[in-house]
Amino acid sequence: MSKSKTVTCAWCKKQFKKATKRINESEKLGQQHTCSRACSSKLANEPRKCEPTTENAANTRRDKEKFPEKNLARSLVRQAIKSGKIIPIEECELCGAEGNLEAHHPDHNRPFLLLFLCKLCHAQADASLDKCENLATDYSECV
């Protein structure tokens, strides 16, 4: 039967039991103790975070932190398009322009309620009060 000791996680500061053999291995390699893979990953990635080098990158990071629902909605739609579950249409749903379309979310809490718009119409839709919600297509049954 292996012996264990109580150690403190270097990331979340939670106390947990760890086999003495594993403690010795970690210390020999100069590693810190973590209670889970998630904490280990966070601890390893922390030094990689750096300050954004441009104002645009700083604004993007700030927006992602301030509006996580937007980031999640964009990510889910990107995955669905990449996997082929959602096939974007070829022309703008408002003006009919072709190519280089963007997905517009009238409501970020409903990520698959979308309009595919050209850049100009997308800017206008974002500026309007109703956000064109009545024109959007619900793709949630596709996913």
Image (cartoon, rainbow, N blue to C red):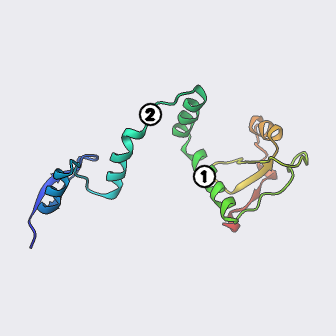
* Image location of residue 103, percent across then percent down: 74, 49
What is the residue that sits farthest to the bottom in this orientation? Answer: 1
Q: Is residue 116 left or right of residue 108?
A: right
Question: Which residue appears at 37% of the width and 39% of the height?
Answer: 47
> In the displayed structure, would residue 5 be above or below residue 31?
below
What is the residue that sits farthest to the right in this orientation? Answer: 96
Q: Is residue 109 left or right of residue 135?
A: left
In the image, which is nearer the foreground, mark 1 or mark 2? Answer: 2
Question: Which residue appears at 58% of the width and 26% of the height?
Answer: 55
Q: Secondary structure at mark 2?
A: loop
Q: Are marks 1 and 2 in contact (CB under 8 Å)?
A: no
The disc labelled 1 sits on which kind of residue? Ser
* Image location of residue 116, percent across then percent down: 79, 51
Residue 6, image quadrant: bottom left
* Image location of residue 20, percent across then percent down: 11, 61
* Image location of residue 124, percent across then percent down: 80, 36
Q: Residues within 10 Å of mark 1 (few under 14, many from 20)?
A: few
Residue behind mark 2:
50
Residue behind mark 1:
75
Q: Is residue 43 left or right of residue 119?
A: left
Task: Check residue 1 in the rendering and tell me which mark sits there, or answer none.
Answer: none
Question: Which residue appears at 54% of the width and 36% of the height?
Answer: 61
